[in-house]
Image (cartoon, rainbow, N blue to C red):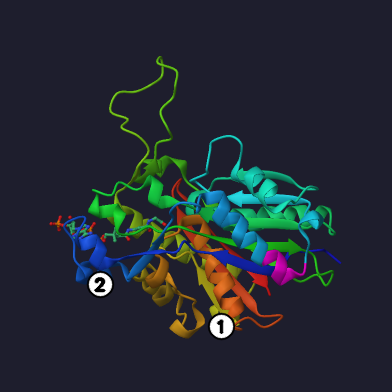
Amino acid sequence: MVKRASILGTGSCLPKRLLTNADLEKMVETSDEWITTRTGIHTRRIAGKGEDNYLLAANAARKALQDAGTEPDEIDLIVVATMTPHMIMPSCACFVQAEIGADNAFAYDINAACTGYLYGLDLADKYICSREDMKILLIGSETLSARVNWKDRNTCILFGDGAGATVISSRGDGKGVYDSNLCSDGRLWHLLYMHGPKSLNPEIVQDGNDGSYIRMIGRDVFKHAVRAMEEAVQGLLDKNNLTIDDVDLMIPHQANVRILHKVMERLGVPEEKVYINVNKYGNTSAASIPVALDEANRQGLLNRGDLLLFCSFGGGFTWGSLLMHW
Ligand code: UT7
């Protein structure tokens, strides 16, 4: 029997500080009404002292380990999906390893922007297929507030911080990740990007690179996101001779409630089959799917054997869909 990656436990950690639309009204020319109707976002969490990316990630990891009944030293691999690591080097995953005492693990980060967690799930499945007893800690964690231009109303209203973690292994029953459909198009990078910190090499430092803010042509990203997620999901269902009616719960990347409603409408999936929490946390990039998954899990919405559908879209562009039996 082919061994597939199953999720044994979930956890999440959101920063304490709440940033409301009313708070944003005092920072940029915007209104609660505009933000609510255009995005569906009411609040987001903003990391403060003692809430660095790796600390949020480690807290989420501890909860996931507890949920899975797994000790830190049983973990073989830690992967953190992030585009806002604490440092460029070492990886966020190495900081998490030290923080939780996962002494037997090897650790590294991946960056596929908002699609990072799905890329990570696919990666974990490949490891499990080749070594079924492997235990993997897969985390999506971001502190986007440190990379947002708080004077740019086009972007600052959208993003939030947080971390979601999952403990992954095989249950030995052939169930778990079912199939995935991952895509990228690097030609469209300029519609959504963030420069890294400036190079220290004066020969290659460019004028006009004023730092590392997120920049986005929102309207274009919106159109691509709707079409790409719909196609990624429909293509995956068709390939497996499934229909949207076979799916028990859809857990999409939480970027904008209008994007989600359009994708749901095109796929013909009813609202009660979709987990949405973008209203509370905004867009937390790679953390959004594992945070939503943890909430759904803790609310008792997931039953063993349920068919879960994940889909995401983000900078790169990167996007994709993944089916998994819970
Ligand atoms: O995780 C994946 C990455 N990101 C996304 O998926 C985000 C995708 N894009 C979006 O969610 C939407 O495009 C936004 C929420 C960013 C913007 O909504 P929109 O309906 O596409 O608005 P728009 O960019 O077309 O702007 C409409 C108007 C503009 O004014 P004019 O040019 O019509 O006079 C903007 O200047 O709204 C203005 N505007 C705002 N007004 C009040 C833009 N941001 C704001 C704001 N408050 N915060």
Residue furthest left in the image: 29
Front-most of residues 191 and 110:
110
Q: Label 1: few (<14), some or many (≥20) within 10 Å?
A: few
**How far across and down, in percent of the image, does residue 165 sit?**
62, 61
**How far across and down, in percent of the image, does residue 237 sit?**
58, 70
Instruction: Name the residue rendered at 56%, 77% in the picture.
Output: 296
Label 1 residue SS: helix
Give the quadrant of ligand 1. Answer: bottom left
Query: What residue would you read off at disc 2?
Result: 37
Magenta segment: 64-69
Disc nearer the start of the sequence (1/2) = 2
Check if mark 1's residue and mark 2's residue have beta carbons within 8 Å. Answer: no
Q: Is residue 265 above or below residue 203?
A: below
Disc 1 under 8 Å from ligand 1? The reply is: no
Front-most of residues 322 and 204:
204
Residue 183 in view of the camera = yes
Q: Quadrant of residue 63?
A: bottom right
Instruction: Name the residue rendered at 42%, 51% in the picture.
Output: 144
Instruction: Name the residue rendered at 19%, 59% in the picture.
Output: 26
Determine whether, in the image, residue 40 is placed left or right of residue 289: left
Query: What residue would you read off at disc 1?
Result: 245
Residue furthest front in the image: 49
Residue 284 belongs to the span the image colors magenta: no
Label 2 residue SS: helix
Q: Quadrant of the N terminus?
A: bottom right
Q: Quadrant of residue 177?
A: bottom right
Q: Label 2: few (<14), some or many (≥20) within 10 Å?
A: few
Disc 2 under 8 Å from ligand 1? The reply is: no
Determine whether, in the image, residue 162 is placed left or right of residue 150: right
**How far across and down, in percent of the image, does residue 224 sit?**
38, 56
Q: Is residue 177 above or below residue 192?
A: below
